[in-house]
Image (cartoon, grey):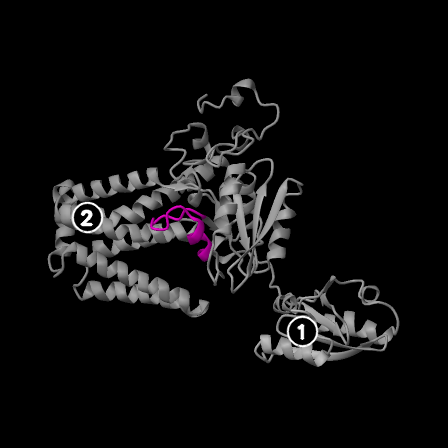
Amino acid sequence: MKVYPSLQENMAYIQNQLFHSSDLKSRNIRLNQLEGLIVFLESLSDQQRIQKEIIKPIEEIKEGTLDELITSMEVAKKTDLNEALDALVQGNCILVFEDSVEFFCVNVKAVYKRNMSEPVNESVVRGAHDGFIENLITNLYLVRKRIENPNLVVRYYTVGSATSTKVALLYMQDLANPELVQEVDQRLGSIAMDTVILPGFISEWIEDNSFSLFPQILFTERPDRTVAHLMEGRVVILSDGDPTALILPVTFFAFYQSPDDYHSRWIVGSFIRLIRLGSFFIASIVPALYIAIIGFHPEILPTNLIYTVKSSIDKIPFPPIVEALIMQIALEVLREAGIRLPSRVGQTVSIVGGLVIGESVVRAGLVSYPMVIVVALTAISSFVAPSSEISTATRILGFPLMILAAMFGLIGITFGLLFLLIHLCKLESFGTAYFAPVTPLRIRDLKDALTRFPIWSMYQRPHDAHPQKLNQVKNAREWEHDDSGKE
């Protein structure tokens, strides 16, 4: 669409194409005896910059070209009015003059930022206390200031035909596997959707198995955690308008790693990580074990303990599976209420609600004391994981295991765990085995999986991301370069 010679016609066309939106504003100007018009969307453009860097120089200097007057801003000449519409909705302003066949597009995008505070969901005891925010450029700054290396590559994408969400793909040119980068590039390019405003939209479009309970992409708001994965040869996706980074490929054990592990002594870090991994089994299996033992295999318990448990469950009118479902669902409801309510009220509701409901159902004879203890232990264990995605998956996993335990006892739990193990071994994340380095077994990578060995002993990067460079310690001995996986 060519530019009209008349300012009124140009303005009328823009107004019609933007459906006479109320935030569309215009202002008359004069440059070199030429009548002009500034058009912008006040909700997206910085009006102070328009006044200070465009209107004021034009009013003070009567001669000269627009490029000479506006030296501190990005100016582009265009001839298609349809491009003017795209520029306006991106926060630019349009300068058009009478009897001109072109217009000027000036970058005056408004930027609103919040402070870089530590992510609430990923707090640490030691280490950096800054986090990503909703501004993409700021997030890229937080990454680049930690990796002052020309090998860090940033590639921009636009996803969502209606929302036009800007997405950045980050990787280390000398570390990331080119096949991985190409695969992620193809999957991002294949997103065919009008609305893409959240990282969850992107993850479901590009992950390998959307029907799996387990997340195959790691979400984080911590720049230090993001940088650590970049330096291992992984790929990171950042999107404008959201403080969450998507890290891929990842393994099951990556969800139980925390920056605190590397700020503590390696023995302490290993002990805490083992506790986190143990919490996975406690949160998913303990309720099912209780149901199976009470309903099918009470002889497993010591004699004194049998009498104690029996006296608690004698007057309960429901079977153990109903008790567990009542308590687990009540716990999930309390948890969700605590999240949705304001922070000061939410904590109070969670604590008071848990105490009142727990005590009331026991006194009413609906639930036994052992079941309350089991559910409380399960709830606490599910919150130990540093990643909320794997924590939610663990809690959901407990429900089918409880049903199997109620139907078949320990045999049902065994078959459920066997199916779970097969699924984890079969699952992949962008060509990486999800349960690596356990399956396939790679002894060297176990140094930073189940436990954390001393930093100086981890002279090789993990093999799961297939990085171009394995060694990350200079002057390593010859046996350290052996790629067999065994020492």
Residue 478: x and y in percent read 55, 18
Residue 421 horizontal side relative to residue 23, left or right? left
Locate residue 480, reporting x and y percent: 53, 22
Q: Which range is magenta?
A: 200-217
Residue furthest top as drawn: 478
Is residue 219 rendered to the left or right of residue 396? right
- Residue 61 image-quadrant placement: bottom right
Residue at image position (43%, 38%) is: 431
Q: Which mark identifies residue 404?
A: 2
Q: Amino acid at mark 1?
A: Phe
Name the residue nearer the viewer: 70 or 344. 70
Q: Residues within 10 Å of mark 1 (few under 14, many from 20)?
A: many
Q: Residue at x 34, y 48 (%)?
A: 212
- Look at the numbered disc 2 and give the secondary structure of its residue: helix
Is residue 377 shown to the viewer in this render? Answer: no
- Residue lying at 43% horizontally and 35% vertically, measured from the top left: 451
Question: Which callout, 2 or 1, points at the residue further toward the start of the chain?
Answer: 1
Residue 215 within the segment the image draws in magenta: yes
Is 150 left, or right, of 484 in this rendering?
right
Q: Is residue 54 above or below residue 479?
A: below
Residue drawn at (51%, 65%) of the image: 162
Please give the count of numbered marks on the rendered protein: 2
CA separation in Å, label 2 and label 1? 62 Å
Residue 40 is labelled as 1
